[in-house]
Every structure is written in C-alpha cells, then in structure tokens.
Image (cartoon, helix red, strand yellow):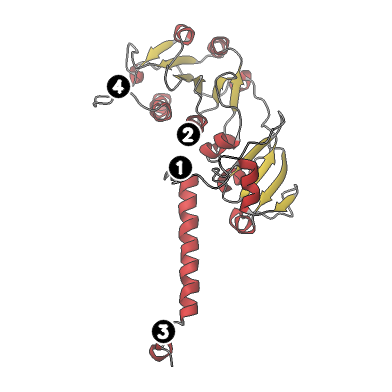
Amino acid sequence: MSKDKKSGGTPATDKSAKDTHYATLRRAHRDAKRERGEIPTPAPQKRKRGADDWKPPALAPDQVFLYGLHTVRAALENPERKNIKLSITQNALARLEVDPDVIGIPVEMVSPQDIDKVLGPEAIHQGVLLETRPLPVRRLEALKDSPLLLVLDQVTDPHNVGAIMRSAVAFNAGAVITTQRHSPTESGVLAKSASGALELIPYIQITNLSDALGELHKLGFFTIGLDSEGPAPLEGTFSGGRIALVLGSEGKGLRQKTRETVSALARLDMPGAIKSLNVSNAAAIALYAARLHLKA
C-alpha cells in the first residue's frame, strides 16, 4: 500500500492537479494586476525565435489590432467600437469570460503562434487578438461641459500616453487631447499600455495645438502649461472652474508657441534631489492637484 493510502492522505495525482489549479489562479491574479498597471511587465530575457525575421503586416487606415485580455474585454464592452473579428486561444477564451455566440463578430480559435505571426513574437498578447476599427472622431466643442482636460504637446511614446490615459480616467478628466503629428495614433501598443482606458476617455488628435488652445479658451478653459522653469507652483496657479493641463514632450518639454499660448505656466515643486519626472508621473500629480482645486 502506498504511503498516501496508509496515512489517509491525498493521492499524488490529486495533489498534482491541485498544484496546477493554484498555479493557474496565481497566474491569472498576476496577469490581472499587470493589466491594471499595478505591477510592471517583465522585460524579455532574450528575443524569441523569429523576432529578427518578423515584419509587421500592412494595416489599412481604418484597421486596428488590439491585444491583451483586459484591453480586448474593454473594447468588446464599448458600444462605440466597431469590432471585426476575434482571434483567440482556447485558454484565453475561458479567461476572457465572454460568450462567443453573443458578441456579434466572428470568433476564430487559434494558437499563440498564430497571433505571434500577426503581432510579432515580442507582443504580450495573452492569447487574444481583436481586429477592430478606430473609435469615432471627437470634436473639442463636445467637451464644453467637462471641467478638466489633459493636453499633450507632442508626447511621442505610446507607453507614456497609455499611462497618462489611465491617470486621466482615474481623475475623471473629460479627454486627452494631442497633436496628429509626433503623437501616437490609436494602436495595440497604446491600448495595451492604457489597459482599457482608451475605451473610457476621448482621445482627440488635432492639427494645430495653438489653435486648439485658443478654442479651449473660448469654451472657458484656463490652460496651464507644466514647465520646470514655471514662475509659480502649480497649486497657486489654478483659476476658474474649467482647467486644461498642458504637458510637453518627453525630452524637449513644451514648444515655444505653446508656452506663448497657454493662460499660464506653472511648475511642480520638488524639494528632493531629482527635479524632473516622467511625463506620465507629472500628469498624475497635476491631475490630482487640479481635482483638489475644482473641489474647493
């Protein structure tokens, strides 16, 4: 008789199944935290096989590929999205928690390698790929009832813009406004970094930033440009009941024309040894300060 049977313990096969079950739960919990941005995505230790040979597919102007469980789930739940096709693995379908018979688009069961061929072997797609159309274009005049906006002056990194979107949604900003040139378009990388926030806040790309700021002034917004050399701390610069925060690019900051157009320039006072922050961190702090002003 085996040791398990003598002691009345759980058979080895049952213990292995239990370990697998708990490992699956731990992995799902870790993936969920990573999707929400609570823990970082680990950098790949080595390039996957085929990474050097992979070339991105040519996309039509109205074609967008979204990936990642949280990103795709948010897109499927967004009534303004026009989705085309869902490609998904069997395991990912169980974790996505959607009924393929009711989402209204074709669902194709695939392997992870099939998705790698479309997105590249470096993409952390979690076994799900959604082909969709870009969200409808929004106009600035539609934002007249929002008390808080975020404006980006040529912030180029989609990971930064995605993180900024998450903060903007968290602090209930009405939109993220950016330039058409030198700014990321709607894409899988942007959406994955935003972790669902792209579906929850308008992402408005305009042709001329100074003209857009002028339009915001006509709508009653007090625009504040964040600048490390600003004449006064941000918390002492707010005015009125409608605020538009303007942040510059990762390296150059605000352009001269933008500096001349905003209602005021302000700085984030940092008493420590480091005097500058990543633009996404600066955006979160500025949004928090703006919300305190608007609640006062």
114 on left or right of 237: right
Mark 3 element type: loop
Residue marked by disc 4: 269
As shown in the figure, which amino acid type bears the numbered disc 4?
Asp
Please tell me which residue is depicted at 55% across the width and 20% down the height of the picture. Answer: 182
**Residue 20, placed above or below residue 287:** below
User: Which numbered disc, 3 or 4, marks the residue closer to the eye?
Assistant: 3
Residue 161: percent from the left, percent from the top?
A: 50, 29
Question: Mark 4: few, some, or many residues within 10 Å (few <14, many ≥20)?
Answer: some
* Separation of marks 3 and 4 at Cα, in angstroms: 62 Å
Point out the tag, 1 or 3, that comes first from the N-terminus: 3
**Residue 45, placed above or below residue 200:** below
Point out the tag, 2 or 4, that comes first from the N-terminus: 2
Residue marked by disc 1: 37
Residue marked by disc 3: 9
Residue 176: percent from the left, percent from the top?
A: 54, 26
Residue 193: percent from the left, percent from the top?
A: 51, 37
Disc tally is 4
Mark 1 element type: loop
As shown in the figure, which amino acid type bears the numbered disc 3?
Gly
Residue 70 visible? The answer is yes
Residue marked by disc 2: 163
* Separation of marks 1 and 4 at Cα, in angstroms: 26 Å
* Separation of marks 1 and 3 at Cα, in angstroms: 41 Å
Mark 4 element type: loop
Q: Residue 260's image quarter?
A: top left
Please tell me which residue is depicted at 55% across the width and 34% down the height of the picture. Answer: 190
